[in-house]
Image (cartoon, rainbow, N blue to C red):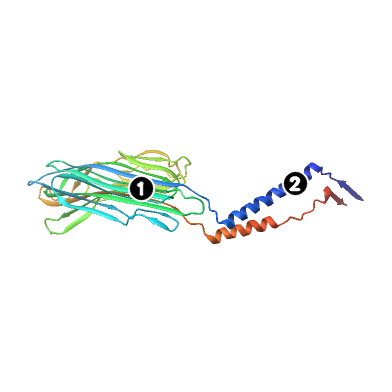
Amino acid sequence: MVVVRYLTITPNQTVFRANIHRFLRSLCLLVGILGLSGLPATASLMQTYSVTHTLSIKPNLGFGGEWQAGWRYDIGDVFAREGNLRDGPKSKIGQIEPFSGSGSMSLSANAGASAAKGTSSATASFSGGSNPFNGTVSANGFAQVNPPPRVGARAYAASSSFLIAGLKRTSSSGAITWNSISSVFASGGASAAKDPIDFSFVNPVSNQTVTGTLLNIDFGIDSGNGSMSWEAGILSLSSPADDLSGYFSIELPSAYTTEQGGVLIRFVNGIISSSSAFGIYSGLAPAVGSKAVGNFAIGEPLINYDFGFGDEPITVDFAFSNGGQAVVEVPEPTIQATLLLGIIGLGLASYRHRFSWAKGRSRLFS
C-alpha cells in the first residue's frame, strides 16, 4: 500500500524564509567587512586609588627620648600611550634627610594623550614633639583610556609615600595608632593599594640591627567593575554587576607586637573564593561562597609593640609607608585575528544553502 501525504506551504511562508536567508547572508557580509577593516571593539576603562593614613606614636620615652623624622616618596613611571605615541615622565623620586621638627612635602606627575591619561601624587607630613609623634602619608593615582576605533591605548599611574620616624634613645615599648582611609576603584583593569609599617632597631646587647614589619595591609582589584575601601576597620566592597575579582589581607606578623593575627580574603566574580583568619582576627573572615559585596567588620587594631629591653635605651626607626597603583590598557587589534574574522564572514556570505524544500511534499511508503 502506498500512502501519499501532501503538506502545503503558503506563499507567505516561502517569502518569510527567503527574507530570513537574505538577512543572514547580509549579516555575514557585514561581519566580514568589519573584520577585514580591522575595526576592534572600543572600550573606556578607568581605575583610581587613594591611600591616606594618619598615625600617632606614643613611645615610652626613657632617658631623654629624641625624635628624628623625614620622608621619601616615589612617582613611578606614569605614562599614557596611544598607538605608538607615548607621553609621560620617567620615574621620579624625592627625598629629604631626617631632621627634627615638623614639615611636609609632596610630589606629583601626570601624562596625557588624546586617548589615555594618567596622574599620581605622593605626600608626607609630620609634626614632632616629645609625646606623641603625629604624621600623615598619602598616595593617590588615576589612570584612564578612552580610545577611538582602530587605536590601542594604555595608561599607567603608580605612587608611594614613606614617612620615616626615628625614635632615638627611647625605651623599647610603646603604642601606634594607625587610622587608615584607603580605596581602589576599577572599571576594567587593575588597581591596588598597600600599607605596611616597618621597623628597625639596634640590639643593645649584640649591637646587631633587627628589622621587620609590625603591620601589613594589602588589597586590590584584579578585574571587574566596582570599588573596594578600607576605613576604620571596615572593608567595603561595591560592584553593580557583582563581577569583582581581587583580594584583601591584613596581618600583624611580628613577634614584637603584643598581639598577632591576620585575615586573607580572595574573591572571584563577586563571590568569596577563599577566606581565612587567625589570631586576634579569628572568626572575622567572611564565609567562602558568600557574596563579596557589602561591609565586613574586621577591625583596625591599636598596635602595642615591645622589643623586649624594658626601659633600656635603644635606637628605634619606624617607616610608615603606603602606596598604590592603577593600570588600564586597550591593546592594539591583532591583524591576524581581524583578517581571519573577515575571511570567515565573507565565506559565509558567499555560501548558498541548497537545501530543497521539495515544495512541502513528503511521502511515506509502507
Q: Label 2 is placed on what type of residue?
A: Arg
Residue farthest toward the left in the current orientation of the protein: 63
Q: Is residue 266 visible?
A: no
Q: Is residue 300 left or right of residue 355?
A: left
For marks 1 and 2, give the one nearer the viewer: 2
Residue at x 16% of width, y 46% of height: 173
Q: Position of residue 93 (x, y in %)?
A: 26, 55
Q: Is residue 134 left or right of residue 334?
A: left
Q: Position of residue 239 (x, y in %)?
A: 44, 41
Residue at x 31% of width, y 44% of height: 51
Q: Which image quadrant is residue 49 in?
A: top left
Name the one closer to the observer, 330 or 148.
148
Which is more N-terminal, label 2 or label 1?
2
The residue that mark 1 highlights is 219
Q: Is residue 124 visible?
A: yes
Name the one closer to the observer, 80 or 211.
80
Residue at x 28% of width, y 43% of height: 52
Dot 2: element: helix
Name the one closer to the observer, 243 or 107.
107
Q: Which mark is residue 17?
A: 2
Residue farthest toward the bottom in the current orientation of the protein: 336
Q: Decide: few, some or many residues near mark 2? Use Cα within 10 Å; few <14, some 14-19, many ≥20.
A: few
- State how far apart marks 1 and 2 are (Cα): 56 Å
Q: Label 1 is placed on what type of residue?
A: Phe
Name the one closer to the observer, 252 or 168.
168
Q: Are marks 1 and 2 in contact (CB under 8 Å)?
A: no
